[in-house]
Image (cartoon, helix red, strand yellow):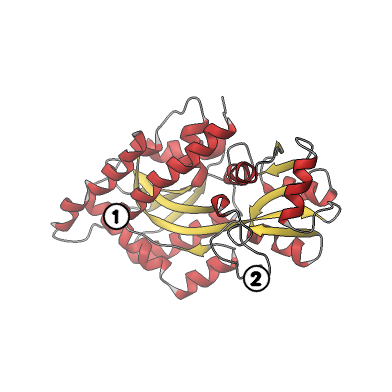
Amino acid sequence: MIHRRFLLAAGGALPMAAHAQAPWQPTRPLRMIVPFVAGGSTDVAARLVSDAMGEKLGQPVIVENRSGSGGNIGGEMVARAPADGHTLLMGVTGLLTTNPHIYRTMSFSPSRDLAPVGMCYTSDLVIVVPLSLPARNLAEFIALAKARPGEISFGSSGHGASTHTAAELFRIAAGIDLQHVPYRGSGGAMNDLIAGNIQMIMIQIAGAAGAVRDGRLRALAVTGPHRHALMPDVPTFAELGLPQATATSWGAVMTTAGTPAPAIARLSEVLREAIASPTIAQRMAGAGVDPQSSTPEELATFLVSESEKWGRVVREARITVE
């Protein structure tokens, strides 16, 4: 029930915003906190929308990378910032809807201390395996895993990251036993996969497209509801009879809880305008993410649904972080 606070944070702001006499304007530069290192798709998306938002707001939106603790360090910075609309967070699946179920203790609550502004992007994942693995398709991979329970390992970008929890969702849906090997980012996992040190990873499509195209890895299935333009020949889980394993990672802009309604309304409006730009959409696609916008209340409803979904996976897979 605690995650329904997202709904209160978004819905409570709307009546006030409707009566605002003039659009809210920032009085100084804004910060956009990215809770991961620079260079990844989340960072690229944040920089694209920050530049566009800054132009529309008349103040620059400066991106700051504050990584660590599965995104919790960056999230706490925004949760503890003044509630004046000048500090934003590019939140992701793990930080906003999975970490509260995984971490035994957190110094802040995403649902209590952060307020929704709007969706930014979605990103499908893909299962990839080394060419040395005797599994040419998903059915053969599942059969191999069932024949060798606990012997096949999969890597992820970190304990509790979407690349971990999405793989656990697949493992549960397929009824197989796999060994998790967490890495500090997807780069190390990819290198070990190509070398044959691990047998599978589930990674954002853009991160694996080159290796699949070059024939260094084999793609078995994409996690999204539809085939992806970067891998049009790779089927979805639904096509392969595992619709319950469908999953998408995503990024959403949040701000500090208690931020005045007019500020949230203006930030959300500017964010949606930025995402609607054909130039930004094209650049996001180049980074392997698909632009996705929403109102604050739509995002709040989505966050509740995602929290419930990943909470079930965390409990069934018994994922915990001290």
Q: Amino acid at mark 1?
A: Pro
Residue at figure coordinates x 67%, y 40% from the top left: 184
Say whether residue 82 is visible: no
Q: Amino acid at mark 2?
A: Pro
Residue under label 1: 26
Residue 170, numbered circle: none
Measuring from the top left, give residue 193's x and y in whole percent. Answer: 78, 49
Q: Quadrant of the C terminus?
A: top right
For residue 107, side relative to residue 295 (left or right) = right
From this viewpoint, which residue is outermost toward the bottom? 278
From this viewpoint, which residue is outermost toward the right? 132
Rendering quarter of residue 51: bottom left
Measuring from the top left, give residue 82's x and y in whole percent. Answer: 32, 39
Rendering quarter of residue 68: top right
Please determine whether, in this image, residue 213 is positioned above or below residue 155: below
Measuring from the top left, give residue 263's x and y in whole percent. Answer: 26, 53
Residue at figure coordinates x 81%, y 60% from the top left: 216
CA distance for labels 1 and 2? 43 Å
Measuring from the top left, give residue 299's x and y in whole percent. Answer: 36, 52
Whether pointer 1 and pointer 2 mark residues with C-beta atoms closer than 8 Å, the reply is: no
- Describe the element under mark 2 as helix, strand or loop: loop
For residue 294, side relative to residue 235 (left or right) = left
Say whether residue 244 is visible: yes
Residue 232, numbered circle: 2
